[in-house]
Image: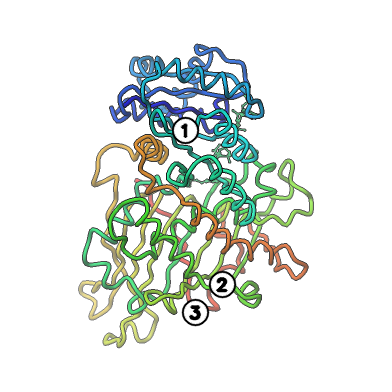
Amino acid sequence: MPHTIVIFGASGDLTKRKLVPALYQLHRKGRLPEETRVVGFSRTEFSHDQWREALTESTEKFAGKKFERETWDEFAKSIYYHPGDIGNRDDFVTLSEFLDELEGKVESERVYYLSTAPRFYGPAAEMLGAVGLSMENNGPRRIVIEKPFGTDGESASKLNDVVHSVFNEQQVYRIDHYLGKETVQNLMILRFANSIFEPIWNRNYIDHVQITVAEEVDIGSRAGYYETSGIIRDMFQNHILQLLMITAMEAPIRYAADPVRDEKVKVLHAVRPMTEEMLTADTFRGQYDGYLNEKDVASDSQTATFAAMKLWIDNWRWQGVPFYLRSGKAMSCRTTQIVIQFREPPHMLFDSCKTRRCESNRLVIQVQPAEGIQMHFQTKVPDAGMRMRQTDLDFRYDREFHGVMPEAYERLLLDALEGDASLFARADEVEAAWAICDPILNHWATKSQPPVYTYERGFWGPMESTEWMRETGREWFDTCPVLQ
Ligand SMILES: NC(=O)C1=CN([C@@H]2O[C@H](COP(=O)(O)OP(=O)(O)OC[C@H]3O[C@@H](n4cnc5c(N)ncnc54)[C@H](OP(=O)(O)O)[C@@H]3O)[C@@H](O)[C@H]2O)C=CC1
Ligand SMILES: O=C1O[C@H](COP(=O)(O)O)[C@@H](O)[C@H](O)[C@H]1O
């Protein structure tokens, strides 16, 4: 069946930087369903050719070495543009006519991709409904919604209501691009396609888990967005909680959208609600030095560019195992890693570990940029009595597999076109994620707010965060991955 993807926000940054380059890569690799057409919609008055030209330039820039002119020209023939305003019903009527004409009224699968400012998500869905574009009488209709999905639980729930007034949940694909990353999907493979990890993946063997998403970049020119967002809305409510869910979930009964999402949501429901004491003791925020001088940032801004927190998951598998989550801008290096820190051996035979503390086993899942997995364990130092040192088994994607890692959007766009929602967030999932974040945001907004610790750019967040962790008798795994 032919496919049409309609991108709302066609002249925007995400479209040119990620969406169209990803669609082009899928075409280049021969993965796009046959007869896939791309239709852009935004207010800028482009003709089809003008939009194609603009995309040629940007795709060449963003696809880099993978750009092949001939292949692109072939792909560009299936790109079209329809100017319009999301607030104008007539523009949706003409869009509908244009799509019918393009598809020749043949049964086709359609994906509507909302890549506009979040305030347009609800109105765009309503307009699609108002002119009958959500009706599935001539093929499946799906809607993809970019992040952020709401700014708190209440707004997310309202947005869900609006979207559900037009589309049923099976038609709705809420994007979290972290789920499109190969290494995040590999975490499910690691856990559920191997038999050696699952038996020890629990409170009996694991002391704690650390999830770090550190970015070297600062907020750049995004102050307008970031000042109202901050690190919790930007990274925790979505990407970090997704990593937490996949790390902590039970095995789904099969790999399909609902069984996977059922298990993920159970994790969020099992996260212990934070009391006032916990909010004070177990959440931590920081701001990089110089943030207040960024263009469009208020001089007394309290916006957090760094946060750390300790969560507990109250279920049989994880009772008593703290999950430490942290993320920040302008940190030491770009690294997303999940550290599974195992318990110490119950009894130490060797003197070298009696006089000093030896590190216990650790599994480090490098989500990016040095994609891979390392297992750390003690090894005997040769010719040195019974001295030992931490060494590792090191799996690296770049050594094992040739070719570059695909962009997350490639996988997600293809899944949306093919109707597989496994790697998209469900309505209850986003609302449950907000239920964890809202109390933190509210606590930070009150008078009794915790301090905003300043940190130097290029550090692992505020020094106090290191102290905060040390007080629990543990250490952050502050290691930048080695790129080869
Ligand atoms: N950029 C990124 O890296 C990321 C973006 N996102 C999300 O994706 C979404 C898009 O982001 P981004 O591309 O950066 O945003 P931009 O501001 O660059 O683009 C917004 C787009 O919306 C269009 N638009 C604005 N008003 C209307 C209207 N009334 N009717 C029709 N179209 C309209 C604009 O075109 P025109 O003015 O021509 O109408 C433009 O194409 C946002 O929700 C963002 O949060 C998520 C992750 C990363
Ligand atoms: O959604 C977002 O993610 C990026 C980080 O994504 P990554 O794939 O580069 O890890 C972050 O920089 C941005 O602030 C946030 O909006």
**Of the image marks 2 and 3, the number of the one nearer the N terminus:** 2
Which residue in the protein does label 1 denote?
A: 135
Between label 2 and label 3, give the one nearer the viewer.
2
Q: Quadrant of residue 83?
A: top right
Q: Residues within 10 Å of mark 3 (few under 14, many from 20)?
A: few
Of 451 and 421, the residue lying toward us = 421
Question: What is the spatial separation of the Cα atoms under label 3 and label 1, in whole angstroms?
Answer: 57 Å
**Of the image marks 2 and 1, the number of the one nearer the N terminus:** 1
Where does the C terminus fall, quadrant-wise? top left
Q: Residue furthest front?
A: 137
Of 291 and 304, the residue lying toward us = 304
Using the image, determine if residue 243 lies above or below residue 484.
Answer: below
Q: Secondary structure at mark 3?
A: loop
**Of the image marks 3 and 1, the number of the one nearer the N terminus:** 1
Which residue is painted at 47% across and 33% down in the image? 135
Which residue is painted at 40% across and 74% down in the image? 318
Q: Position of residue 209 (x, y in %)?
A: 42, 68
State the count of labels: 3
Which residue in the protein does label 3 denote?
A: 473
Between label 3 and label 1, give the one nearer the viewer.
1
Using the image, determine if residue 412 lies above or below residue 103.
Answer: below
Q: How is the image coloured?
A: rainbow
Using the image, determine if residue 340 lies above or below residue 226.
Answer: below
Which residue in the protein does label 2 denote?
A: 273
